[in-house]
């Protein structure tokens, strides 16, 4: 590696600020469905709470699994948020999606069985509750290069 | 690439469930300080809200910048959460850190100037507010391989 490359490593060029482009609901749900992991955001004992979790998207809704005693179970019947992003920490390009909807317990045995086959917890331990978040509001943005044409 | 490697790509081996190892407060803050990006979680008009944002850690507190009119400004004086993670979506290894603390506006001009020099927004637009979240509760976990010794 030459001295110039090494110097560039030591003093990296500042990344220019990105432009925020709003995503449509369809774009947001497509991006969310393309990754397996996000964060459920809810109110727990009057405090803002967040839990990272893996998910699948089924029929436009977010499906997650959790365990008995999990704080998020207290949010069933309430509006929660779900957030996912894929933003490169080096070049600051990527996207973020946030949706809001009621958290509902999935209790139909056939549906639970189907989700248990499709959605494998990333963490050891029994995950005997399935939660469905049907989005009522979906927002998202993409960070894109700000190309200003100066003619 | 041989046929076996290609077949493995088409039918990836399921990733085994990981073990969750609790992190100490010191470990959590060190990991959080090692990445530039997280999510502030707050209550906005009685609803759980989340905004992805870039940060620095100063004196053990999370420092973020935002703009006039941002929803998160309504959370100043309230307890908010801040969450960051670095979990590999392929091998399901990594960590997540969550802290809770009061969001406070930074108003001292010299301190604001110092943070403006240290913390460059990733997104275009004026970011004329600095918020400091001093953690009162810090929790974190690491997802590690579950190596069970069977002797």
Image (spheres, coloured by chain):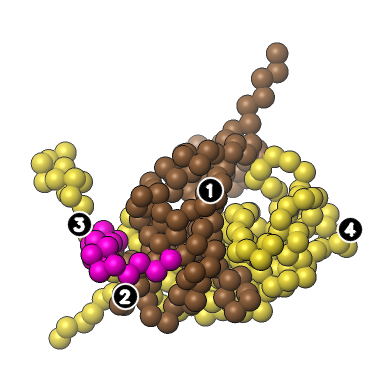
Chain colours: A yellow, B brown
Inspect the magenta stretch and tell me whether residue B117 lies in it: yes
Horizontal side, residue A66 vs residue B7: left or right = right
- Numbered tag placed on residue A109 in the rendering: 4
* Mark 2 residue crowding within 10 angstroms, few (<14) / some (14–19) / many (20+): few
Dot 2 and dot 3 within a common chain: no
User: Which residue is labeled 3 in the image?
Assistant: A13
Disc 2 is placed on an element classified as: loop
Q: Considering only vertical position in the picture, is A54 above or below B42?
A: above
User: Which residue is labeled 2 in the image?
Assistant: B128
Furthest residue to the right?
A: A109
Disc 4 is placed on an element classified as: helix
Residue shown at 48% from the left, 53% from the top: B135
Label 2, label 3: how far apart the Cα atoms are: 24 Å
User: Which residue is labeled 1 in the image?
Assistant: B138
Horizontal side, residue A31 vs residue A53: left or right = left
Residue shown at 86% from the left, 62% from the top: A107
Residues marked 4 and 1 touching at CB (< 8 Å)? no
Q: Nearer the viewer, residue B146 or A32?
A: B146
Front: mark 4 or 1 = 1
Q: Considering only vertical position in the picture, is B144 above or below B151?
A: below
Residue shown at 26% from the left, 58% from the top: B118
Subunit of mark 3?
A
Furthest residue to the bottom?
A: A151
Residue B30 position within the rendered picture, expressed as x and y whole percent measured from the top left: 42, 42
Residue B144 position within the rendered picture, expressed as x and y whole percent measured from the top left: 57, 35
Q: Nearer the viewer, residue A56 or A139?
A: A139
Label 4, label 2: how far apart the Cα atoms are: 52 Å
Q: Give the image quarter of residue B69.
A: bottom left
Residue A73 position within the rendered picture, expressed as x and y whole percent measured from the top left: 76, 59
Dot 1 and dot 2 within a common chain: yes
Inspect the magenta stretch and tell me whether residue A12 lies in it: no
Residues marked 3 and 1 touching at CB (< 8 Å)? no
């Amino acid at each position: 590696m030459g001295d110039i490359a090494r110097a560039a490593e030591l003093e990296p060029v500042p990344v220019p600020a990105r432009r925020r482009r709003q995503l449509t609901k369809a774009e947001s749900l497509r991006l969310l469905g393309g990754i397996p992991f996000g964060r459920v955001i809810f109110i727990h004992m009057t405090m803002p709470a967040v839990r990272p979790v893996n998910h699948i998207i089924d029929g436009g809704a977010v499906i997650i699994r959790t365990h008995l005693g999990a704080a998020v179970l207290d949010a069933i019947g309430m509006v929660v948020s779900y957030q996912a992003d894929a933003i490169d920490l080096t070049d600051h390009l990527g996207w973020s999606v946030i949706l809001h909807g009621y958290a509902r317990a999935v209790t139909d045995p056939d549906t639970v069985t189907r989700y248990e086959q499709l959605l494998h917890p990333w963490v050891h331990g029994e995950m005997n509750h399935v939660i469905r978040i049907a989005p009522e509001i979906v927002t998202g943005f993409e960070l894109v290069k700000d190309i200003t044409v100066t003619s």
